[in-house]
Image (tube, grey):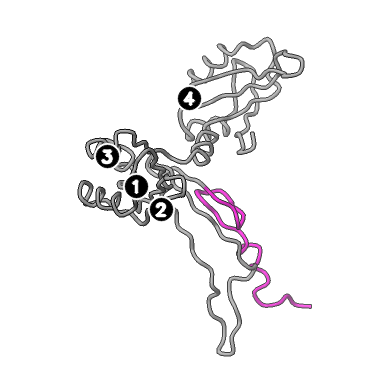
Amino acid sequence: MPPRKGGTNLSKQGQIYVNGENVNQGQTAVADVGGTMAMSHIPRTKASATTKTSSGTKAGLIKQSNFSIAPLILEGVKLHKLQLNDVIKQHLKDLRISDIQLSRSGHFTIYAADVSSFNRLLNELTPILATNGQATAKIYVPRSIQRIKDTEKVAFVKNVDIEIPEGRITEALKDVGLDAIDVVRLMNKTKNVPTRTIKITFSDPHNRNTFVHTGLQVDSMHFIAEAANQNT
C-alpha cells in the first residue's frame, strides 16, 4: 500500500533546530547572542504543519518563534509603570522596549527588543535611577536563565584515575588553549572520599563545547568529556 501524501515528511516537521541542536517542540532554548542572553520557546503544535480546506491546503496556525532577548528584573524602586516608562523615555530615548510589567511584590520585568537595548538597560538604568531618587535600584537577569547560562560552561569527565591531580588536568587544558576557570574532583558525599569524576567549568560555552568534542588528553591518557545538563 503506497504511503499517504505528506506522511513521509512528518518526522522532519516534528523537529526544530536551534543553533544547530535539535530541540523538541514545547521546549525552551537559550542561546548566546553577542554575549547577551537570548531565549526562544518552541510551542507545541500538531504533528502536521498544514490544515486541509475545501479550497486546498493552507498553512496552519503555527507561529514561527524567533529568538527574543531575555527579560531583565528591576527591584528596589518605588515607582509605578508610567513613571519608569517616562524615566527610560527621557534618559534613554533610543532604547527599544517591547514591554514593562510590574508584579505585586513591586518588581519590574523589562523586555528589551534588541541586544543593544538589553546591554544599555543592564549598564545604564540603575545609575540613572539613582540620580532620580531611587538609590536602591538593582537590575539583573532572572536566576533561572542565569543558571542555564552557567550550566552551558560546565563539563564532566568520568573514570579519571584517582592518582591524577587536578593540577595536571588544568595544565593539560591550558596546553591545548582551553580556558578553564575551575577544575575539581567530585567527592562521594556519603563516604567523603574522592570519586573518579572531574567537574570542569570554562570561561564560556565555546570553550566547553570544544572540550566536549575533543575530550581530555593528559599526556598519553585520553578521557571522554560530557556536557552538563540542566538537571546536574
Q: How far is mark 2 from mark 1, CA to CA?
A: 19 Å
- The kind of residue tagged 4 is Leu
Q: Earlier in the sequence, mark 4 or mark 1?
A: 1
Q: Secondary structure at mark 4?
A: loop
Q: Secondary structure at mark 2?
A: strand
The residue carrying mark 1 is 115
Closer to us: 203 or 93: 93
Residue at x 73%, y 75% (from the top left corner): 3
**Residue 218, position as x, y percentages in the image:** 59, 17
Q: How far is mark 2 from mark 4, CA to CA?
A: 41 Å
* Of the two numbered discs 3 and 1 in the rendering, the one whose residue sits closer to the viewer: 3
**Residue 136, position as x, y percentages in the image:** 34, 33
- The kind of residue tagged 3 is Leu
Q: How far is mark 3 from mark 1, CA to CA?
A: 21 Å
- Give yes or no for residue 120 being in the magenta stretch: no
The residue carrying mark 4 is 178
Q: Secondary structure at mark 3?
A: helix
Disc marking residue 101: 2
The residue carrying mark 3 is 129
Q: Earlier in the sequence, mark 3 or mark 1?
A: 1
Magenta residues? 1-29
- The kind of residue tagged 1 is Val
**Residue 19, position as x, y percentages in the image:** 50, 48
Quadrant (top left/top right/bottom left/bottom right) for the C terminus: top right
Instruction: Please tell me whether residue 92 is drawn above or below residue 66 in the rendered image.
Output: above
Q: Earlier in the sequence, mark 2 or mark 4?
A: 2
Q: Earlier in the sequence, mark 3 or mark 2?
A: 2
